[in-house]
Image (cartoon, rainbow, N blue to C red):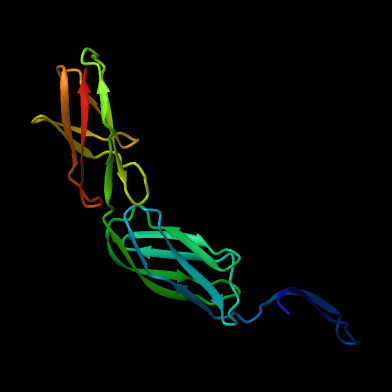
């Protein structure tokens, strides 16, 4: 059976030779089992919370737990440990939109031989939406403003650090979203009246464009 053993080797001696003894250790290892990796293809949009999952089983179709699985998707390399069901999963959030031939590898260990698999990971640009409710402000309020929030439509996550253009009666301003995906648009310069603001995000390599109109009353 498998394990580490100590062997004591002894010669008792005779009328011509004195006795001798020595100890040695040896490892007895069970035969390693072959394994298979099963991975499903992934189709998703950017930063929308999708995972790629791999299932590792031995040659007897038993789940292999506590095994490290490496996922290489384009230039991104991620690792995860299999659970009791032999499943390891990693998020594809943050990986740029493209179609990838992902390589998934179990390198093997003392008990199991390694295995490899491939999967197609298709990540598209995410749709976006702008949340900006109609509002009323006092035209005498020098701190008057309205808020617009740019959101990943699929995941409802805020999109930060991108430029949104606001057009109010032909007057345009470009504002960058903060960590909450928000821009704050001052209304202090507007006289008494009703206005329409056209709020536009042009999109980029990760996100599709979005646009919305709101009205605000300066009273």
Q: Quadrant for residue 218, please give it.
A: top left
Residue drawn 26% across the image and 31% down it: 134
Residue drawn 38% across the image and 70% down it: 41
Coordinates of residue 67 in the picture (x, y in percent)? 55, 66
Q: Quadrant for residue 178, please give it.
A: top left
Give the side of residue 125 with respect to residue 17, left or right: left
Quadrant of the drawing holding the N terminus:
bottom right
Residue drawn 48% across the image and 74% down it: 37
Q: What residue occupies the far bottom of the structure in this picture? A: 15
Q: What residue occupies the far right of the structure in this picture? A: 15
Query: Residue 182, relative to residue 201: is it above or below?
Result: above
Quadrant of the drawing holding the C terminus:
top left
Residue in front for this viewpoint, 81 or 24: 81
Q: What residue occupies the far left of the structure in this picture? A: 170
Coordinates of residue 212 in the picture (x, y in percent)? 21, 40
Give the side of residue 42 with respect to residue 29, left or right: left
Coordinates of residue 115 in the picture (x, y in percent)? 48, 76
Q: Quadrant for residue 116, please give it.
A: bottom left
Query: Residue 10, relative to residue 193: is it above or below?
Result: below
Residue in front for this viewpoint, 184 or 15: 184
Coordinates of residue 174 in the picture (x, y in percent)? 16, 33
Residue in front for this viewpoint, 82 or 133: 133
Query: Residue 63, relative to residue 128: is it above or below?
Result: below
Query: Residue 85, relative to residue 162: is it above or below?
Result: below
The total of numbered circles placed on residues is 0
């Amino acid at each position: 059976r498998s394990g580490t053993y100590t062997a004591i080797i002894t010669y008792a001696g005779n009328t011509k030779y004195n006795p001798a003894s020595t100890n040695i250790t040896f490892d007895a290892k069970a035969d390693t089992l072959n394994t298979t990796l099963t991975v499903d293809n992934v189709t998703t949009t950017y930063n929308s919370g999708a995972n790629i999952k791999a299932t590792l089983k031995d040659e007897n179709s038993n789940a292999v737990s506590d095994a490290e699985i490496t996922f290489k998707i384009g230039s991104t390399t991620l690792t995860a440990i299999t659970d009791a069901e032999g499943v390891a999963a990693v998020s594809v959030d943050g990986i740029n939109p493209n179609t990838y031939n992902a390589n998934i590898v179990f390198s093997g260990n003392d008990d199991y031989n390694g295995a490899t698999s491939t999967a197609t990971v298709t990540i598209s640009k995410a749709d976006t939406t702008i949340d900006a409710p109609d509002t009323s402000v006092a035209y005498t309020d020098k701190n008057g403003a309205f808020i617009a929030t740019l959101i990943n439509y699929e995941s409802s996550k805020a999109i930060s650090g991108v430029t949104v253009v606001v057009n109010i009666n032909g007057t345009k301003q470009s504002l960058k979203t903060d960590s909450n995906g928000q821009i704050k648009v001052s209304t202090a310069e507007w006289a008494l009246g009703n206005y329409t603001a056209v709020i536009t995000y042009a999109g980029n390599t990760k996100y599709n464009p979005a646009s919305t109109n709101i009205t605000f009353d300066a009273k």
